[in-house]
């Protein structure tokens, strides 16, 4: 079980407030009329100016009855909220009040670590007067995750995160005890990014575990984790990871600034975050690379990127991300550079095919048949005799059908998905050709296009190409090859206008970064990659010393006499 | 509300998308024509019209579309192609006559060869070449062939190896790398030579031999667009030597030991000129490497190789001089482009004389050096 506290708990209240102002959208105050967690009519959650209690915190005055009243009036209206009152050190001791949400707290550990010692030896704390909380923390409570506060806002936050708040009558400080038992998924294989060679772990849905997975891979004191909470209602934790002294601080600053500006009511996935953080929010292209693999996340972190992890999703974002980043996977570093380069080139070919094949089919058949070799042109013409539809209609029918099959197969449970593939692809495909509705060549084109589109390693990247494919199909139908070229130019000009946190999207190709080309369309051998990608503008551009090949090998000659002697005797 | 929408950042993409979608609904965009509405012309033959003086009779060969279906299965019609011919004062006019007899739109983009009759008048040939060049649908790289006789006869000769006779020349010229009797000439090449001062064009010559055979027989020599005559097989080979191209046939070298057949492998050529008594003298140096292809006597003494090389070189020289004689004396046509060399390098001289009158008397020295390689194979 992993528990996380908000950073810097033990600071004076005033300092803490300014800190909180910076790092968190505020939680509701105890309203005079309504409950503490219900915004009144004037408070529009989506308008940052009207967010209630921005920075203002209600202070606990040490009166247990008022605390009880406060909690009862707000969060206590829920049936899963529990308050447990007891006396420190026996029947006449000072009263204490435990408050928590029953379903997300490990009650047994609270009993063992908090209630039991306080019941047995609570009089020590009781005698300390207003310092009771400090004494309890210092000498009684055996849990390790303990801190103190004096505001209800912190109390509510830790309670909502599955922890426990302990009020002691007459002591103005509230003890916050870590005892969270949030339900979560265990670490599993990454679903969307398989690797034949590489770590088998994927990120889970729980932020704490995800941070731990990265920490395990980068055991360095300069790995910085900054957590802020976003979403007026969902209060989702978002962690920003970077390596101090390596990551360019300008990127970190930009990420933090953009995150703080986000005012939404909730988000359950990192995609909405991406939508808010993009340089150009309207482009179909993703400019934040999402990954499910902790090894990939650690790798890009040390390449000078910033990670953005949202709670409740295994997809971690890295910035800045260029077009090339979406075609690189962890597996490229699990093969030697020949294999990795081969795979990269294959991906490039797959991308070209998935984007251009249907458009080329139309252009070559309908508009520019002179560009096709004689025999092929005649074969195509022969095969199309008696077909009812022009090539464009054919492409539309078949490509829409393919998209439908793909979508249906995705939504169904996997055994049924196979059925859809067989029935949809094989049976319908066969029948549609046999019936003379679609030419067999079109079916080949559609099949290759579909398979090629799956070579894109990141799912997000598939969508823009699937959409732009249609643009090219329309242009090809109107202007033939010229149309395809014009369409490509439009796409290229759009791509070159994009940036990801200031880094040009097409880098290292445009603007040309010769050094970064060693890890782009191909992957250079490890010993020759001694520098971090220039595009990330890392503070430490060099990552390794020159390595001389061949490395020293043990001399086998020296061992020879011994073995010979052995044979002779 | 309208103000708000007008300012929307999505406005441009949405309009663009709408525009594209609507454009997709348009029919008949420019060249967009379905294959089943096109008639692919695979080859053209051009003859003078025998019935009307001054007219051209153009024969187009087209595939039977249904027969072109790939793969097996359904029964195919017996005939896979057919001819349509039309007559008119120009090629374009004749083509429109052909179009009148076709149900589909004629498409010339796949035509790979044009067969020109040797009976065409010079001005007719000029006209046809010009029209082919000006037609934007016609590929510049299509092959030109001269038919010794009627072009239509050649077009209609069935070729057992090729499904479509019109593709015959395309296949021949692209498959055979070493020259035998004639070199392929593409439309743009013919045009370029025709328009270059001091250079005269040639065309490969083919004739229908027997019932189902097309045979390449030699090289047609022009002066301007005017046909001068044909070089036969030997003379054509001589021409290729002079042009610095390897020839597929073997060279015969007679030595006291026996007869040796030498196959040429590679050839290097340098041309130079000088003036003697105000007249240009050309020197063409050929450096041919070859290997022994057949011999009636072996092994050959390596010391006797020089002799063998010299004898083989003599055969090259014989063929080259034969071609040179035909060019200068019979055809008076500078198909080697020697005049072009003078045009570039001695423009004053070239402008001062009429090259086609000077060329027949110009002295051309041919020097041949033969180098036999792969000597180990001799033994």
Image (cartoon, coloured by chain):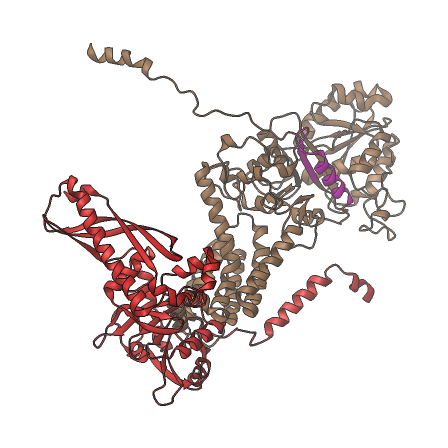
Chain colours: A brown, B red
Q: In the image, is residue A241 above or below residue B228?
A: above
Q: Residue at x 44, y 39 (%)?
A: A338
Image location (x, y in percent) of residue A93: 82, 23
Image location (x, y in percent) of residue A152: 83, 36
Question: Does the magenta segment cover residue B374?
Answer: no
Q: Residue at x 67, y 47 (%)?
A: A499
Q: In the image, is residue A295 above or below residue A459?
A: above
Q: Is residue A121 left or right of residue A205?
A: right
Image location (x, y in percent) of residue A526: 50, 32
- Residue situated in front as seen by the camera: B335 or B185: B335
Would you say residue A186 is visible in this rendering?
Answer: no
Q: Quadrant of residue A217?
A: top right
- Residue situated in front as seen by the camera: A375 or B237: B237
- Residue situated in front as seen by the camera: A538 or B277: B277
Image location (x, y in percent) of residue A463: 58, 55
Would you say residue A102 is visible in this rendering?
Answer: yes
Question: Does the magenta segment cover residue A249?
Answer: yes
Q: Quadrant of the N terminus of chain A?
A: top right
Q: Which residues are magenta?
A: A238-261
- Residue situated in front as seen by the camera: A39 or A63: A39
Q: Is residue B54 left or right of residue A13?
A: left
Q: Residue at x 50, y 25 (%)?
A: A547
Q: How many tags in the picture? A: 0
Q: Is residue B130 left or right of residue A564?
A: right
Q: Residue furthest bottom?
A: B51
């Amino acid at each position: 079980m992993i528990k996380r506290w908000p950073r810097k708990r033990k600071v004076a209240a005033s300092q803490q407030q300014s800190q909180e102002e910076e790092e968190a959208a505020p939680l509701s105050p105890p309203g005079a009329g309504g409950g503490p967690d219900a915004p009144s009519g004037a408070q529009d959650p989506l308008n940052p100016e009207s967010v209630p209690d921005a920075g203002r915190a209600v202070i606990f005055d040490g009166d247990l009855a008022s605390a009880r009243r406060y909690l009862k009036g707000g969060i206590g209206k829920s049936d899963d909220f529990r308050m447990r009152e007891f006396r420190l050190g026996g029947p006449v001791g000072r009263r204490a009040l435990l408050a928590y949400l029953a379903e997300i707290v490990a009650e047994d550990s609270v009993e063992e670590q908090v209630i039991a010692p306080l019941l047995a030896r609570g009089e020590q704390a009781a005698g300390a007067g207003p310092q009771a909380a400090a004494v309890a923390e210092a000498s009684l409570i055996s849990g390790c995750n303990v801190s103190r506060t004096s505001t209800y806002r912190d109390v509510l936050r830790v309670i909502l995160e599955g922890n426990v708040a302990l009020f002691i009558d007459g002591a103005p400080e509230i003890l916050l005890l870590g005892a969270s038992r949030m339900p979560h998924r265990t670490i599993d294989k990454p679903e969307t990014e398989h690797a034949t060679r590489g770590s088998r772990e994927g990120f889970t849905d729980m932020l704490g575990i995800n941070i731990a997975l990265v920490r395990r891979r980068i055991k360095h004191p300069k790995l910085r984790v900054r957590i802020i909470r976003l979403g007026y209602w969902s209060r989702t934790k978002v962690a920003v990871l970077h390596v101090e002294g390596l990551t360019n601080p300008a990127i970190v600053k930009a990420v933090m600034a953009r995150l703080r500006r986000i005012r939404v009511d909730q988000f359950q996935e990192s995609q909405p975050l991406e939508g808010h953080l993009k340089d150009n929010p309207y482009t179909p292209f993703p400019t934040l690379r999402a990954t499910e693999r902790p090894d990939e996340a650690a790798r890009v972190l040390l390449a000078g990127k910033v990670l953005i992890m949202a709670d409740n999703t295994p997809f971690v974002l890295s910035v800045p991300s260029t077009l090339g980043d979406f075609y690189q996977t962890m597996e490229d570093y699990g093969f030697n550079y020949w294999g990795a380069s081969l795979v990269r080139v294959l991906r490039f070919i797959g991308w070209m095919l998935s984007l251009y094949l249907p458009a080329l089919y139309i252009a070559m058949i309908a508009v520019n048949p002179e560009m096709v070799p004689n025999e092929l042109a005649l074969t195509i013409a022969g095969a199309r005799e008696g077909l009812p539809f022009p090539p464009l209609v054919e492409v539309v029918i078949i490509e829409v059908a393919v998209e439908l099959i793909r979508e249906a197969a995705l939504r169904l449970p996997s055994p049924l998905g196979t059925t859809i593939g067989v029935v949809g692809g094989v049976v319908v495909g066969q029948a549609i050709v046999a019936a003379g509705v679609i030419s067999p060549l079109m079916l080949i084109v559609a099949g290759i296009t579909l398979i090629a589109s799956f070579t894109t390693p990141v799912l997000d990247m598939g969508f823009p190409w699937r959409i732009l494919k249609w643009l090219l199909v329309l242009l090809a139908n109107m202007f033939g090859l010229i149309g395809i070229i014009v369409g490509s130019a439009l796409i290229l000009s759009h791509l070159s206008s994009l940036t990801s946190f200031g880094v040009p999207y097409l880098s290292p190709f445009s603007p040309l970064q010769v050094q970064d080309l060693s890890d782009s369309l191909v992957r250079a051998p490890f010993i020759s990659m001694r520098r971090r990608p220039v595009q990330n503008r890392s503070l430490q551009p060099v990552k390794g010393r020159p390595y001389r090949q061949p490395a020293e090998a043990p001399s086998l000659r020296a061992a020879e006499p011994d073995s010979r002697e052995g044979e002779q005797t | 509300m309208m103000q708000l929408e007008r300012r929307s950042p999505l406005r441009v993409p949405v309009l663009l998308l709408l525009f594209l979608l609507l454009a997709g609904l348009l029919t008949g965009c420019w060249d967009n024509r379905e294959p089943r509405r096109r008639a692919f012309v695979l080859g053209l033959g051009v003859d003078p019209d025998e019935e009307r003086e001054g007219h051209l009779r153009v024969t187009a060969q087209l595939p039977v579309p249904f027969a072109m279906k790939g793969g097996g299965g359904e029964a195919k019609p017996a005939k896979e192609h057919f001819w349509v011919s039309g007559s008119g004062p120009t090629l374009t006019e004749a083509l429109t006559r052909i179009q009148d007899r076709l149900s589909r739109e004629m498409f010339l983009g796949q035509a790979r060869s044009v067969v020109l009759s040797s009976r065409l008048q010079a001005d007719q040939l000029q006209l046809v070449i010009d029209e082919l060049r000006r037609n934007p649908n016609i590929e510049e790289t299509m092959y030109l062939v001269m038919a010794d006789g009627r072009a239509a006869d050649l077009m209609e000769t069935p070729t057992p190896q090729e499904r479509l006779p019109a593709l015959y020349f395309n296949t021949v010229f692209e498959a055979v790398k070493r020259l035998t009797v004639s070199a392929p000439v593409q439309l743009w090449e013919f045009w370029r030579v025709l328009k270059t001062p001091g250079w005269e064009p040639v065309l490969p010559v083919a004739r229908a031999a027997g019932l189902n055979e097309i045979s390449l027989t030699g090289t047609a020599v022009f002066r301007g667009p005017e046909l001068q005559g044909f070089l036969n097989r030997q003379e054509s080979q001589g021409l290729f030597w002079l042009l610095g191209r390897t020839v597929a046939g073997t060279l015969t070298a007679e030595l006291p030991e026996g007869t040796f057949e030498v196959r040429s492998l590679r050839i290097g050529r340098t041309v130079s000129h000088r003036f003697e008594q105000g007249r240009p003298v050309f020197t063409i140096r050929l450096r041919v490497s070859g290997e022994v292809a057949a011999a009636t006597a072996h092994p050959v003494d390596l010391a006797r190789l020089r002799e063998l090389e010299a004898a083989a070189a003599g055969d090259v020289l014989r063929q080259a001089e034969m071609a040179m004689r035909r060019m200068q004396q019979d055809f008076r046509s500078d198909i080697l482009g020697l005049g072009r060399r003078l045009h570039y390098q001695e423009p004053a001289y070239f402008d001062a004389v009429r090259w086609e009158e000077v060329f027949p008397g110009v002295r051309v020295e041919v020097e041949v050096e033969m180098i036999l390689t792969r000597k180990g194979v001799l033994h």
